[in-house]
Amino acid sequence: MDGAPTHKQPMKPAPALPLDEIDRLYAARGDLQYGESVTQREHALQCATLAEQSGAGAELVVAALLHDIGHLLHRDAAGALQTGANDMHEALGAKALGRWFGPGVAQPVALHVQAKRFLCAREPGYLEGLSAVSRRSLEIQGGPMSAAQTAVFERLEHASGALLVRRWDDLGKQAQMATPPLAHFLAIAGRCLLPRRAGAVRRAHRGSATESPVAGS
């Protein structure tokens, strides 16, 4: 998705995104509208559902779910869009996700805006099929790629994954589409955590369990 939230409340970017932080972020800001027919939470769940239904691997499903999380981490993405500035949500999201996930998640997120620019240059009719919000953000993001830029992009290791995320991004804007809950996809995300991060999450959960109060005797 390309639009920005309609709020203007600043939010300090989180240094990392463990699963509980992702859950809290969508609980707090998932109902924000992005100039499309869906909320940010609905868009994320729809993209992840489309990825899962297509048979995509776990990392691409997680990338589809979290490709726009940078919008929610940005201090004032709405203001950036209104003033014609690029909020770089793809870079912000990929940087945060890269602390917890490997490049199979972070890089398609980092490249999904470039994937739109690539498709606008290479695929006849793609630009005309974009929503008004996507066309507006395309201008801010640099417009269709040049021939030289497309040649560089298609050689990138995660270009194919980014193009798939972009396709799901375009389709995940349907009113009242049925999807699994966020918890379903967070469970998939848990399997994609970097080994050291997964261990930290398991230790934290064990610590929470052992510290639970016991009823008095």
Image (tube, rainbow, N blue to C red):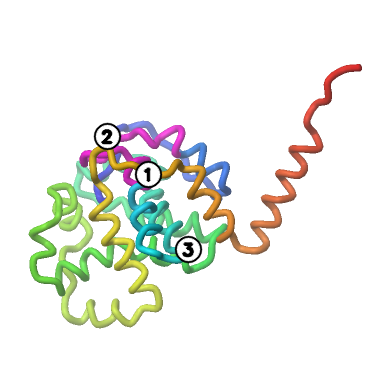
Kind of element beneath mark 1: loop
**Residue at 43 percent of width and 59 percent of height:** 61
Vertical position of residue 46 compared to residue 105: above or below: above
Q: Residues within 10 Å of mark 1 (few under 14, many from 20)?
A: some
Q: Which residue is mark 2?
A: 6
In the image: residue 67, left or right of residue 79:
right
Distance between mark 3 and mark 1 Cα atoms: 18 Å
Vertical position of residue 42 compared to residue 191: above or below: above
In the rendered structure, which amino acid carries the disc numbered 2? Thr
**Residue at 37 percent of width and 47 percent of height:** 44
Kind of element beneath mark 2: loop
Q: Which residue is more in the foreground, 178 or 42? A: 178
Distance between mark 2 and mark 3 Cα atoms: 30 Å
In the rendered structure, which amino acid carries the disc numbered 1? Thr
Give coordinates of residue 187: x percent, y percent: 55, 50
Give coordinates of residue 82: x percent, y percent: 20, 41
In the image: residue 160, left or right of residue 22:
left
Q: Which residue is mark 1?
A: 179
Query: Where are the magenta residues, as a range?
Result: 26-44
Q: Confirm whether the magenta stretch covers residue 33.
A: yes
In the image: residue 197, left or right of residue 140:
right
**Residue at 19 percent of width and 69 percent of height:** 119
Give coordinates of residue 18: x percent, y percent: 58, 48
Give coordinates of residue 210: x percent, y percent: 81, 37
Circle nearer the N terminus (2, 3): 2
In the rendered structure, which amino acid carries the disc numbered 3? Glu
Distance between mark 2 and mark 1 Cα atoms: 24 Å
Mark 2 touches mark 1? (CB < 8 Å): no
**Residue at 45 percent of width and 57 percent of height:** 62
Q: Tell which residue pokes out farthest to the top in this image.
A: 217
Q: Which mark is residue 59?
A: 3
